[in-house]
Amino acid sequence: MTVFLIGGGWSDELAPEIYGGFIAAAAATAAAPPTAAPPTAAAPTAAPAARPRVLLVLMGTDEESLAYHERYLHKLELVGGQELEVVRVPEGDPVDPAVVERLGDVDGLFVGGGPTPEYHASLRPAYGRIRERVTEGMAYAGFSAGAAIAGSHAVIGGWRIDGTPVCPEDSNEELDPVTVVEGIGLVEGAVDVHAAQWGTVSRLVAVVEAGLAPHGIAIDEDTVLGPDGRVRGAGRVWHARRAESGAVTLTTTGPAGPPR
């Protein structure tokens, strides 16, 4: 599957590096014959000439949300080369079935950030179709909340496990207990975001230690994990795995190399 997981962040300078691989992969899908196997992602500088159709799904329709959404449009404009369709989902509403139907006509799906519990609640009816289309070759990019719900085990918020704090309270997404639900299933395990910036690495470790997910990753801001396993951007991807002894090991991957 061609999946890009972005930990958040708003660097203009890094936009081509963070978003370019996704646009290139969507363009490869657009250029591929209908019967071809799903393409692999190209490097950000090697995008095919085809203009991909990208569906950008964002949460909220109030004035504050609309202003926030402009950040995504700006970042994608810095990369360019795509035909962009924006869908704004009112908080508390399930995604419109017509939007789910549109997935059959696009080359890439970008799910933005904001309230992770709301993204999960609204998009859950579409999880099966999203998974099906990504299997067929559609590129997927998740930013913050969009990355968190991409895992088989979606960490949608919370800051305490069994009453014990495991991360800063400000990272709780208005949930008290750490809450892990069934995600889209584009990658195995849990995905947490804003890792170094919000202090969520410890939450990921606690999730794995408690058996709420078999393993997982936490992604720094201005950092993307691509389908080839490479990390691009300014930060790191943190990997948490549980050993047979029950101990959780934590390794990191930076832009320059493999986990360590």
Image (spheres, rainbow, N blue to C red):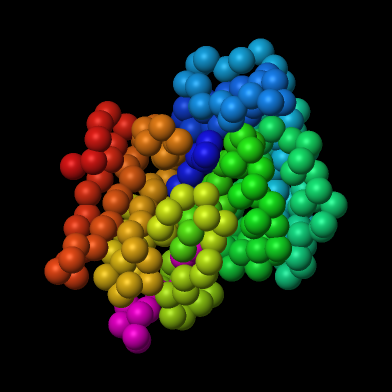
Q: Residue furthest left?
A: 245
Q: Of residues 217 and 76, which is closer to you in this image?
A: 217
- Pinpoint residue 198: horizontal percent, then vertical percent: 39, 59
Q: Residue at x 66, y 63 (%)?
A: 124
Q: Residue furthest right?
A: 98
Residue 39 falls in image quadrant: top right
Q: Is residue 15 above or below residue 70?
A: above
Q: Of residues 47 and 131, which is closer to you in this image?
A: 131
Q: Is residue 52 left or right of residue 211?
A: right
Q: Is residue 168 above or below residue 197?
A: below
Q: Quadrant of the C terminus?
A: top left
Evaluate whether residue 95 shows in this view: yes
- Pinpoint residue 143: horizontal percent, then vertical percent: 54, 47
Q: Of residues 31 and 59, which is closer to you in this image?
A: 31
Residue 203 magenta: no
Q: Residue furthest bottom?
A: 163
Q: Residue at x 61, y 15 (%)?
A: 48
Q: Is residue 32 left or right of residue 90?
A: left
Q: Look at the image and give the residue range highlighted in magenta.
A: 154-166
Residue 25 falls in image quadrant: top right
Evaluate whether residue 157 shows in this view: no
Q: Is residue 51 above or below residue 22?
A: above
- Pinpoint residue 4: horizontal percent, then vertical percent: 50, 39
Secondary structure that dominates the magenta span:
strand
Q: Residue at x 42, y 59 (%)?
A: 190
Q: Is residue 235 left or right of residue 158?
A: left
Q: Residue at x 22, y 55 (%)?
A: 250
Residue 159 magenta: yes
Report how many numbered discs are placed on residues in the image. 0
